[in-house]
Image (cartoon, rainbow, N blue to C red):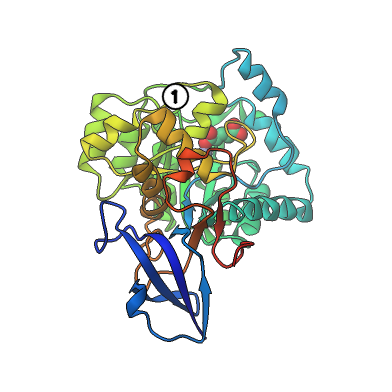
Amino acid sequence: MSLLVTGIGELVTNGPDGDGPLGIQHDAALVVEDGVLTWVGARRNAPACDARIDVEGRAVLPGFVDSHSHLVFAGDRAGEFSARMTGVPYDGGGIATSMAATRGAPDDELRSLVAARVEEMRRQGTTTVEIKSGYGLTVADEARALRIACEFTTETTYLGAHVVPPEWRGDRAAYVDLVAGDMLAACAPHARWIDVFCEPNSPHAFDEAESRRVLAAGVEAGLMPRVHGNQLGPGPGVRLAVEFGAASVDHCTFLGADDVAALVDAADTTVATLLPGVEFSTRSPYPDARKLIDAGVSVAIATDCNPGTCYSSSMPFMIALAVREMRMSPAEAVQAATRGGAKALRRSDIGRIEVGAKADLCVLEAPSHEHLAYRPGVPISRVLGEERWV
Ligand SMILES: N=CN[C@@H](CCC(=O)O)C(=O)O
Ligand SMILES: [Zn+2]
């Protein structure tokens, strides 16, 4: 069964065959067969198909790729957010609160919480989401989080090294042993990635040596590395990510000149994933996206949806923040939320509209991608095929 999509006022391809860096085509059409794009081009040249939908001048772009989220959690931390708004700084200590709530939730409850969050993302145009563990922090609870995450995405990340849980605070080294040993063995079959909250500026997170140990063990077990780095202050996260050839180093809020230079050199390998919802929700300074992009760093943006630093699943909101607060152009922000996210997940079948790519498409109730940042907070984006207009 082939489906022809016509009436596309603006098609953002992220490819070489259109205008500007977004590869924009006008009066375009595309053909979908079995979930894959089999033809993309000018409407006048479109082939005959079994069915057709007309999007009546709306913009179509690749579905958003949210390459950083922590969706497997129970409870919330609204009180912590309110305290932050009166000046209490974030230090990662609240992760233990979510850990306790998550450990106490039955499987079915966690599963429905994740399902609701993934559905909330899809309703806003997100077609791929990476999901981390990290609120279990026992062998059984981390493995359970990843098993549940696997029901929703292939992009699952083992984050046993999120924080040192309270029961191990007297013996951090033993907890790192567990994360790199039995916990990894139980989790690796359910994960594609390994991550670590490398943050010497938090007493709860992991320093350089601990992070190195965890990443090396993960790589040895066949997982690919990614890193939470330079979130709360300057630190070794970016350096470590580049050293390990990580697909992404996420946050990048506090970078020195050396970090930027390392990311420029590693631009083919390591993406700097910016999470502006975190700065919004923690009242922190935003990363200097302008400097990174101008220097030649590969940049993505993602939600980091989690109960502590950013309880938002909205990629359009992140795009609006990236434009307004981080001085990215609307085109740069849209590209970072699509092709950038795909690169941060080492995926070439998503984040672009070209023959052979997955037909993961987002349609806007608007004529151009600029409206995503121009109309913040307005629900104008949907996954094509699931939305109310066609
Ligand atoms: N910084 C580490 N992890 C999450 C926050 C988790 C939490 O506070 O619950 C983040 O990416 O911001
Ligand atoms: Zn995170």
Tell me what residue is drawn at x 44 percent, y 24 percent.
200
Q: Quadrant location of ligand 1? A: top right
Tell me what residue is drawn at x 34 percent, y 68 percent.
354
Q: Residue 266 at x, y = what percent?
A: 24, 44
Classify mark 1 as within 8 Å of ligand 1 or not, answering yes or no. no
Count every numbered label the image shows and give the total: 1
Give the side of residue 58 with respect to residue 164, left or right.
left
Residue 196 showing in the rendered view? no
For this rendering, which residue is in front, 174 or 201? 201
Q: Residue 77 at x, y = what percent?
A: 70, 30
Q: Quadrant of the C terminus?
A: bottom right
Residue 215 showing in the rendered view? yes
Q: Amino acid at mark 1?
A: Pro
Q: Residue 383 at x, y = what percent?
A: 55, 60
Element on which disc 1 rests: loop
Picture quadrant where residue 79 is located = top right
Question: Callout 1: 10 Å neighbours few (<14), some, many (20+)?
Answer: many
Vertical placement of 95 versus 103: above or below? above
For this rendering, which residue is in front, 150 or 212? 150
Tell me what residue is drawn at x 72 percent, y 50 percent.
113
Tell me what residue is drawn at x 66 percent, y 43 percent.
136
Q: Which residue is mark 1?
A: 200
Q: Residue 106 at x, y = what percent?
A: 79, 50
